[in-house]
Image (cartoon, helix red, strand yellow):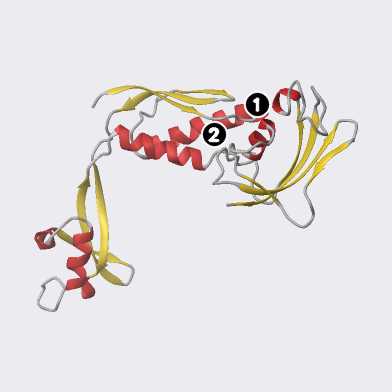
Amino acid sequence: MRQDSLLIELFVEELPPKALARLGAAFGEGVLASLRASSLVDEAAQLKVFATPRRLAVHISKVRDRSPDQAVSHKLMPVSVGLAPDGQPTPALLKKLASLGEDASAVARLQTRGDGKAQTLFLDAMAQGVSLAVGAQKALDAALAQLPIPKVMTYQLEDGCSVILKITLLDGTPCYETDSSYYDEIPIDHNDKESGLNEGLKMLRTGEKAKMILPNHLAHGLIGDLGKIPPLAIILVDVELVELR
């Protein structure tokens, strides 16, 4: 069974810099623990982790291309349930065997063992090892599910959202505000709103509020909006994401 080094790289949008060390360690340890549980790594395997705001990576030595086959013992059911008085298998036993990929011929291989107060049927078998491709995907899924991310961010919304907006200049001069009788309906990335607002909304979840300071290149640029926002203006946006749709 061949052993080699394994490198898994995960490219992400943006991770909090202060949490990188903790996220990198959790990612690497989660992958290694899952591979070890699947018998895909040697006990002497060495772990190295890498973490940047846009990448998590783990390098593990002495990884098997396939885990070894393992002897397993399947506990089936009490003898009184699995075998009729004449020793023939009951429908319940045959159904249980089928769920394990076996047929009636497996009845001859069953073992009877004491299990508490009842005699119980067991089926001893050899479980085939798993490939590295299957085990690595399982390890990746498990590690991601347990990442200690301070706040789960989403970067793609649905068709649009309903928001409450208040836009002012940095000196407090009011520019625009959502009318109290309705919400602003914004189709993300397909509207005439500030590009910075569109990017900020992608980071919010329903019910969240945010205060955004948008520099002119993410707001209305060199000429302003030809209305209440002057040229080269930095604007302050208070926003509440009411609903996704």
Q: Quadrant of residue 63?
A: top left
Q: Residue at x 33, y 68 (%)?
A: 116
Which is more toward the observer, 239 or 47?
239
Q: Going by the image, does 76 lie left or right of 236?
A: left
Check disc 1 and report its element: helix, strand or loop: helix
Image coords of residue 118 (percent x, y): 28, 72
- Badge 1: residue crowd in 10 Å (few <14, some 14–19, many ≥20): few
Above-or-below relation of 54 to 178: above
Which is more toward the observer, 171 or 8?
171
Please state which amino acid type lies under the numbered disc 2: Ala
The residue pinned by badge 2 equals: 26
Q: Residue furthest bottom?
A: 85
Which is more toward the observer, 175 or 25?
175
The residue pinned by badge 1 equals: 17
| Dot in front, 1 or 2 | 1
Please state which amino acid type lies under the numbered disc 1: Pro
